Amino acid sequence: MEKIRVLCATAKNEIGKNIIDDFLKLLLEINVKIEKQERKYLEDYNYEIIEEYEQDSLNLISINGEFQYRSNKCKFDIQRMTKDNQFLLDIQIVYLEIDDIRDLKNSQWFDFKEILLNKISEKYEYIYWLEDTQNQKMATELYLNMYELENYLREIVNFYMCSMHGGNWFEKYSYEDYLNKYKKFSEWFRNSKYNLFKKIDNHLFNLEIDDIFEALKSAKKIQLKKSTKKALETIEEKEKEKATNIANIKLLGQLSLWDEEKMGEAFKESTVLRWQKDLSKRRNMIAHNKMICREMYFDTLDSIEFFKNEFNKAEIILNNRIVTNEKNYIKNIQRDQEIQLNLEYCGIDSNFLNEENIIDRINDTDDVIELSGEMEDKIKTIELLLDDEILELEELIEYLQIDNFFDRDKFVAKELLNQYIEFLQSTSIVFCMDRVIKSYDM
């Protein structure tokens, strides 16, 4: 069962005293079938008995009854009110069928309201939608989802900023405007008698939702008073050449915590703008139970789902940046356990993991023993070859004595010299090493 109450004022086209009958005609135009009705006239409050046919329709002051719209039953109660020649029409309609907002797309009750509004807007200058239980359910559903979304964002920001900058990050780094906003919005509660939850830090909960991102963008490790900041900005603008002699205007250019923490990688600029320019405005309408059309209802649900997904991705990015002592300890333990498992899989006892034990363990394997034997044999072969080559070189050196080529300072052994040159070419160091390498490869 649903109900609406609508107040119409200042009729267009001077409807006048027959305002109720005109409204009944309007109902007939939208295919409403009136089944029961009870009329009240001014004459009904006169003690004189007046025949029904003598009752003046211009004196009709109220009517109630039942009607059907697309086979759906409704009750109605309509009152006429007059004040200083201004006519008001108080309309109350109760929908007697079940209407579930989960099936809002197919709601015949919403269809009726939409048609009714379009019709009465043609006849009345002012329309006040005083009560609408269906709209209240829609607003409640949207606000619940939005409330969860807002707190999810506050949860992400608070957890990350406290982890990175300590529990006092808001009071320590926030810009003066947002500290004042917090104090203003929390003043009543802080001064109230309800002490239990005053023990909980609630800075972000006392900011409007479109301030959450802006508070981060203005937060700095060296925060300036508003008056100081304004003075520095004036100096920078009007006395830039003398600025260094007057004040340190570089303070204006210091990075905010938003930039320092690269929060834009977690919260894209397009997401932040959509949050500030669109969702926060929808929230105000919903929180005050303003009338919500079907299109806005479903668009808002889609928007809330979009932000949930975006905030979830942001939370993952930010949490991956947080490295605590506990995380490092667990990481090291897990790494050691993984090494232990790998060693066990390879048949290596981790209790003997020092350099000497590892070398001994390797040397005891069959492959290494076999390789060592082969290396020893090759080394012996190389040694023998080198001994032969060294012996030949020693003999060569003995022959290369100057006395063998000169007799009383006269060169007498040209032919012998040529023989030695040929011998040197055939027994060079390169040639010797080549013979050794070839022998090793064999």
Image: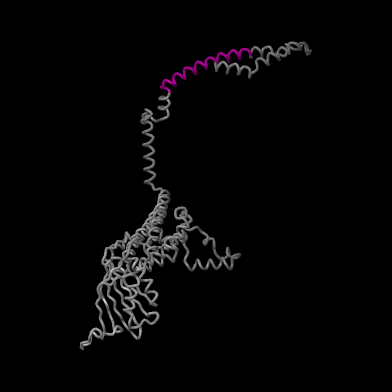
Q: Position of residue 93 (x, y in %)?
A: 29, 71
The quadrant of the picture occupied by the C terminus is top right
Identify which residue is drawn at 36% across, 29% down. Answer: 349
**Which sits in the foreground, 172 or 45?**
45
- Of all residues, the one furthest to the bottom in this rendering is 48
Task: Give the overall secondary structure of the magenta segment.
Answer: helix
Q: Is residue 116 positioned above or below 355 on the image? A: below
In the rendered structure, the answer to whether residue 425 lies left or right of residue 82 reads right
Q: Position of residue 360 (x, y in %)?
A: 41, 24
The quadrant of the picture occupied by the N terminus is bottom left
- Magenta stretch holds residue 372: yes
- Magenta stretch holds residue 237: no
In the rendered structure, the answer to whether residue 330 lies left or right of residue 226 reads left
Q: Is residue 181 positioned above or below 55 on the image? A: above
**Which sits in the foreground, 7 or 398?**
7
In the image, the segment drawn in magenta is: 363-392
